[in-house]
Image: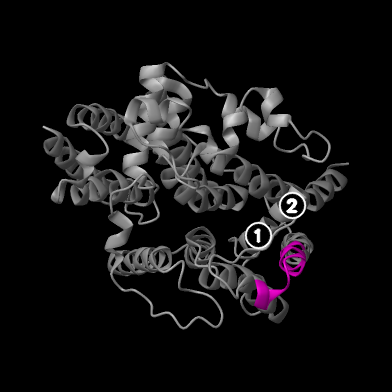
Amino acid sequence: MFENLVWATAILCIAATLHAYVKYEDVFHPTLILIPMCSFIYVIMPLYLIKDGALWNYVTESQAIWTQTIILSSLVLLLGGLYHGSAVKVLRRTNETFDRAVLHKGAYILGALGLAAWFYVIQNSGGLMEVFGHAKGIGWSDLGYIREAAYLIIVALLLLMSPQGFAPTDKRWLIAVVVLSLPYIVQGLLGAQRGPTFLIVATLGMSWYLARGKRPAPVVMVGGATALALLLLLLVTNRNNIYLGSDQELKTDIGGMFEAGEANEYIFGIGCMVAADQTDRFFWGRRYLAQVIVRPIPRQIWPTKYEDFGVAEILQNAGVAGPGLAQIMGWEEIPGAAAAMVGDLWVEFSWFALPVMWGIGYWYGSTWRKAVILSGPCATQYMILVLLSIYMVSQSGEAVIFRLVILSAPTWYVWHKSKRPWQQRMRRLAG
């Protein structure tokens, strides 16, 4: 029964991906981005785990059947939202223009701030050689605002490579793009981190086509996506072997990514869902609200902010496991484990996770629709959602929410400022 459910999920993912391409004729449609990611966790992983029966060392068949049924239902609703959102009516704004000089100025300022923050956390941790001279190298600062300010680099790149900001013949623009790309390339490759690697590759790759109003051929898209997926798997597999001065051989066998264990996203997700259901322990939005209300307040000002807000568990694996995991499942969580999208939403909302999945699909679909028709800030916002998709599917809502705010707020501000000069000229002419 369980294997049949997994194969049904596989058929749904394949059919939806093919149908979305035929229907929308856009390889950048969110269905073609989100669903392949979902199929990796909810199809490929379980099929690999049941091949040698390793899955049953951690979960029972009845637990796996129950969770896979919820997963399949969740993906059906996600697709429903994607299709419904992709059909939303959008009026083209024929009188809206943007000042490229303002866009570039905003990008250069934000990019400089992001670079300064990135170099600060690296230098604060001993410098480049110290940070990347050991496995999983990453800079650090006790001030969260400085740590997260490095995301302004991505904001700057999105503005520079937007349809209205794209200027490859401008030497200053070209130098800025190259310089701003280097920190995330270094962080992703030398730090063996899939998040930064995905962010920079997707930012440069997709923006290059979106800015010119073009799309890669399907074979190019499939080849590029496959190469990126293999690179990310290679980084994860060799995260302990990649650093400056390393004499370790790189492993080309990525099978370790699928090995059974408490840190496996599929197994950990099942455990969290079953434990939350049997202990009736759900957060009902509190973990997500904490990312907006509590997280922006520095810990130096409010040291016990998460405890006082009632989500002390959020400090360990985003709070998805809870004390009932060991009691119910017979094994404990490992620091750094993620329950992935369905598991995280289930712990947060119980059965209401299903309509939330529909809402996520609608959000992605409608933003894509606006990006295609309106371009401008809507195209940049869609790129932000694409960049966050890896966190959305493989990690947690918490990993998405704070990044969404950091990337979106300054982006929309710059777009707004770039539109004001034109409006002022029109008001003067009308007066």
Report the quarter where the C terminus lies: top right
| Colouring method of the image | one colour
- The residue sitting at 71% across, 24% down in the picture is 308
Above or below for 431 versus 207: above
Residue 337 part of the magenta segment? no
Report the quarter where the N terminus lies: top left
x and y, in percent, of residue 399 in the image: 55, 43
- The residue sitting at 71% across, 63% down in the picture is 100
Above or below for 147 versus 7: below
Q: Are marks 1 and 2 in contact (CB under 8 Å)?
A: yes
Residue that mark 1 sits on = 159
Going by the numbered disc 1, the residue's amino acid type is Leu
x and y, in percent, of residue 146 in the image: 76, 54
Q: Which mark is residue 414?
A: 2
Q: Quadrant of residue 73?
A: top left
Is residue 146 visible in the rendered image? The answer is yes
SS assignment at label 1: helix
- The residue sitting at 77% across, 36% down in the picture is 297
Going by the numbered disc 2, the residue's amino acid type is Val
Please tell me how many numbered marks the rendered image carries: 2
Q: Nearer the viewer, residue 287 or 335?
A: 335
Q: Is residue 18 left or right of residue 360?
A: left
Residues rendered magenta in the picture: 117-130
Q: Quadrant of residue 325?
A: top left
